[in-house]
C-alpha cells in the first residue's frame, strides 16, 4: 500500500473515531461544518481527503482533543503534499497543474499529441485503464475527467482543436486492449461527429487525425498552445521526458503556432477524421 | 430472526475488463454511462432477445411507480440496493418530483464506478438529503451500519428498501452458492415495523415458451460474460417477502403493478401479453 493510501486510511479512522465519539452522525457533522455528507462518507472510506481549513472545521465541531487534532492536521498536511490537487484533481504531476488550471479558463487551445491522448479526449474506460484504477481513486478520477470535459461546454471557449497522431490509437490498442480502444474511438466520434450516438459534438471543438501514411518523419514533441482571456497572454506547454516546459515569449508562441498549422494542414479535416475513425474501429473490431 | 450472514466479503474492485451489469442496464435504458465493452455485450443480448430492452424499461417504470406509490403512503426514507448508474431517472428524482424536499434516499452499490457517478451527480445537484455509498449487499448488517452511518435514515421510522432487478443477479458466497434469499431475510429483520420491501425479479415461469428459450440463451450469455444470474419461480419470488403483507395487486408482472402511477413525465410501456415482461414485481409491508 503506498504511503499516501496508508495516511488516507489513518485519517479516515481518526475522523470516524472522533465523530462517533462525539457522538455525531455524518449528516450532523455535514450540517455543522458545511462539508457535504458524501464528502464525509468518502473521507471516512479513505477515498477522499480534506483541506487544512476543512480539517480544522472538523476538529472544532467535534471538539477533538489537542494531541489527536495535531495528528489529524499532520496527516492532512502530509496528504496535501502528496496526491490531491486543488481538492479534486489527483494524480496530476506538478508540471501539468498550471496547464490544467489554464484549461479551465482558456479561450483557445491548439494541441498536438503523438504519443498519448490528452485528458479531455479520454473516454472514461481509457482514463481508468491509464491510471490502473483502484476503488479508492475512482471517484476523484471520474470527477476530474468530468471537470476537464466541461471545457467543451464553456460559453467563452472560442476554439479547441487537437491534431492527433494515428499512432496514439494503435499504441492504446496494444497497451489497453481492444474494448478500451473501441470505447475511446466511440468517444472521439461523440466529440467530433455531430451525427454520432450521443450528439455531443460542438462546432468550436475539433479533432484532426494525422495518419501514419502522411509520411512526416520528424514530429515535434506533444505541445499545446493556450490563449488566455484578458491581458493574460498565451503560452505553449511542452511535455518532455523529465516534466513539462512553459514557453511564454511571443516568438515561442508564434513558432509553435506555425508548427501546429503545419501539422493541421497535413492532418485530416473533421469529416475525413470521422470516416477514418469509423474505418479504424472496424479494423480493431475484427482484430 | 434468520441465521446471521457472515460479513466477510472483500470490497469489490473496479473490473475494467468485463461488461458491468449496471452499465449494461444503463445502455438498455438509453443512458450514456456505459462503455464499448458493455454495449458490445448488450447489443449481442438484444440481438438474441430483442424484448430485453422494453423489459428493462418496464422494470424501470415499476421502480418509478413503486416510489410514487410509497410516497403516497407517507414513506420518506428509501434505501435503494444495487442502484447502478443514475443516468436514466432515479429514486430521488421521482420522490422529489412527487413532493420536493421531504424524501431521503441512500443509494447502495458495490461497483465503484457506479457509486462514483451517483456521488458526483448528487454533489452537483447539491441536495444533502441523498447520498450514495459503496457497500456489499451480501453483508446485510455491515451494509445497514453503513447506511445508518450516513445519518440520513432514521432507524425508528419506516424505510422503503428497494431491491429492483438485483436478486436475479446471483449473490454468491465464498463457496459460489447463491445466498439471495438468506440476505433478503436478514434485511427483512433489520427493517423497522411499518417498513416496505420492493422487489422485482426475472422469472422463466409462466412466460411464453419461445421467450423461455430466449431467457435460457440470455442467461448463458450473462453467466459466461458478466455475472451469473438466476431466474426464480413465482413461488420463490413470493417467498422472498417472508411474512410481509403484499400490497395490492400482489406479486404480478411489472406492467400490471399500479399502472395508474406511471405519471405524465414517463411514457408508459405495454406488452401485448404482460408475461412477456418476464419480471415479477411486488411491494410488501412489514407488520
Image (spheres, coloured by chain):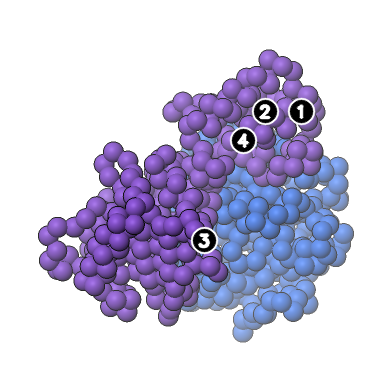
Chain colours: A purple, B blue
Q: Which residue is mark 1?
A: A60
User: In the image shown, does A169 or B275 lie closer to the viewer?
Assistant: A169
Q: Please tell me which of labels 4 and 1 falls first in the chain.
A: 4
Q: CA distance from mark 3 to mark 4?
A: 31 Å
Evaluate whether residue B273 shows in this view: no
Q: Which residue is mark 4?
A: A51
Q: Residue at x 43, y 64 (%)?
A: A108
Q: Position of residue A155 (x, y in %)?
A: 55, 69
Which is closer to the viewer, label 2 or label 1? 1
Q: Residue at x 34, y 52 (%)?
A: A249
Q: Please tell me which of labels 2 and 4 falls first in the chain.
A: 2
Q: Residues within 10 Å of mark 4 (few under 14, many from 20)?
A: some
Give the quadrant of residue B140: top right
Element type where label 1 sits in the image: helix
Q: CA distance from mark 3 to mark 2?
A: 44 Å
Q: Residue furthest top?
A: A67
Element type where label 2 sits in the image: helix
Which is closer to the viewer, label 3 or label 1? 3
Q: Residue at x 59, y 22 (%)?
A: A74
Give the quadrant of residue B138: top right
Q: Is residue A27 left or right of residue A94?
A: right
Q: Which residue is mark 2?
A: A15
Q: Please tell me which of labels 2 and 1 falls first in the chain.
A: 2
Q: Which residue is mark 3?
A: A230
Q: Position of residue A136 (x, y in %)?
A: 51, 39
Label 4 close to label 1 by CB (< 8 Å)? no
Amino acid at each position: 500500500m503506498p504511503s499516501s493510501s496508508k495516511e488516507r486510511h489513518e485519517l479516515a479512522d481518526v475522523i470516524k473515531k472522533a465523530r462517533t465519539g462525539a457522538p455525531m452522525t455524518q449528516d450532523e457533522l455535514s450540517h455543522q461544518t458545511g462539508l457535504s455528507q458524501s464528502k464525509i462518507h468518502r473521507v471516512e472510506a479513505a477515498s477522499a481527503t480534506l483541506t487544512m481549513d476543512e480539517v480544522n472545521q472538523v476538529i472544532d465541531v467535534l471538539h477533538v482533543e489537542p494531541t489527536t487534532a495535531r495528528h489529524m492536521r499532520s496527516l492532512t498536511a502530509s496528504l496535501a503534499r502528496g496526491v490531491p490537487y486543488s481538492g479534486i484533481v489527483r494524480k496530476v504531476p506538478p508540471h501539468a497543474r498550471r496547464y490544467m488550471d489554464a484549461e479551465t479558463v482558456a479561450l483557445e487551445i491548439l494541441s498536438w499529441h503523438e504519443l498519448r491522448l490528452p485528458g479531455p479526449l479520454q473516454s472514461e474506460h481509457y482514463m481508468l485503464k491509464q491510471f490502473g484504477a483502484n476503488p479508492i481513486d475512482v471517484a476523484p478520477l471520474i470527477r476530474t475527467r468530468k471537470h476537464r470535459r466541461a471545457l467543451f461546454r464553456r460559453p467563452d471557449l472560442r476554439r479547441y482543436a487537437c491534431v492527433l497522431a494515428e499512432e496514439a490509437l494503435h499504441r492504446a490498442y496494444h497497451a489497453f486492449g481492444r474494448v478500451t480502444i473501441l470505447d475511446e474511438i466511440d468517444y472521439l466520434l461523440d466529440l467530433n461527429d455531430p451525427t454520432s450516438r450521443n450528439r455531443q459534438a460542438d462546432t468550436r471543438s475539433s479533432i484532426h487525425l494525422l495518419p501514419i501514411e502522411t509520411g512526416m518523419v520528424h514530429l515535434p514533441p506533444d505541445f499545446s498552445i493556450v490563449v488566455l482571456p484578458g491581458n493574460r497572454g498565451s503560452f505553449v506547454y511542452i511535455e518532455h521526458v523529465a516534466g513539462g516546459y512553459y514557453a511564454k515569449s511571443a516568438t515561442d508562441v508564434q513558432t509553435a503556432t506555425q508548427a501546429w498549422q503545419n501539422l493541421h494542414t497535413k492532418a485530416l479535416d473533421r469529416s475525413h477524421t470521422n470516416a477514418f475513425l469509423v474505418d479504424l474501429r472496424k479494423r480493431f473490431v475484427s482484430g | 430472526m434468520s441465521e446471521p450472514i457472515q460479513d466477510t466479503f472483500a470490497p469489490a474492485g473496479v473490473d475494467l475488463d468485463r461488461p458491468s451489469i449496471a452499465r449494461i442496464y444503463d445502455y438498455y435504458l438509453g443512458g450514456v454511462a456505459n462503455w464499448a465493452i458493455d454495449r458490445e455485450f448488450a447489443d449481442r443480448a438484444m440481438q438474441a432477445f430483442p424484448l430485453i430492452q422494453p423489459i428493462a424499461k418496464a422494470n424501470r417504470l415499476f421502480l418509478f411507480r413503486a416510489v410514487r406509490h410509497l410516497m403516497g403512503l407517507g414513506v420518506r426514507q428509501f434505501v435503494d440496493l444495487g442502484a447502478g448508474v443514475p443516468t436514466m431517472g432515479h429514486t430521488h428524482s421521482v420522490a422529489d418530483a412527487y413532493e420536493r424536499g421531504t424524501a431521503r434516499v441512500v443509494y447502495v452499490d458495490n461497483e465503484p464506478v457506479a457509486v462514483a457517478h451517483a456521488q458526483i451527480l448528487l454533489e452537483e445537484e447539491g441536495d444533502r438529503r441523498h447520498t450514495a455509498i459503496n457497500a456489499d449487499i451480501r453483508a446485510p448488517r455491515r451494509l445497514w451500519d453503513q447506511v445508518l452511518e450516513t445519518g440520513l435514515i432514521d432507524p425508528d421510522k419506516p424505510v422503503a428498501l428497494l431491491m429492483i432487478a438485483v436478486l436475479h443477479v446471483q449473490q454468491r458466497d465464498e463457496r459460489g452458492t447463491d445466498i439471495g434469499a438468506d440476505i433478503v431475510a436478514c434485511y427483512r429483520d433489520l427493517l423497522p415495523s411499518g417498513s416496505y420491501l420492493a422487489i422485482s425479479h426475472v422469472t422463466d415461469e409462466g412466460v411464453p415458451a419461445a421467450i423461455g428459450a430466449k431467457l435460457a440463451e440470455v442467461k448463458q450469455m450473462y453467466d459466461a460474460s458478466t455475472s451469473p444470474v438466476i431466474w426464480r419461480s413465482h413461488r420463490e419470488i413470493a417467498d422472498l417477502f417472508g411474512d410481509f403483507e403484499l400490497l395490492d395487486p400482489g406479486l404480478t408482472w411489472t406492467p400490471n403493478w399500479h399502472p395508474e402511477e406511471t405519471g405524465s413525465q414517463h411514457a408508459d410501456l405495454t406488452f401485448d401479453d404482460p408475461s412477456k415482461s418476464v419480471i415479477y414485481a411486488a411491494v410488501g409491508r412489514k407488520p
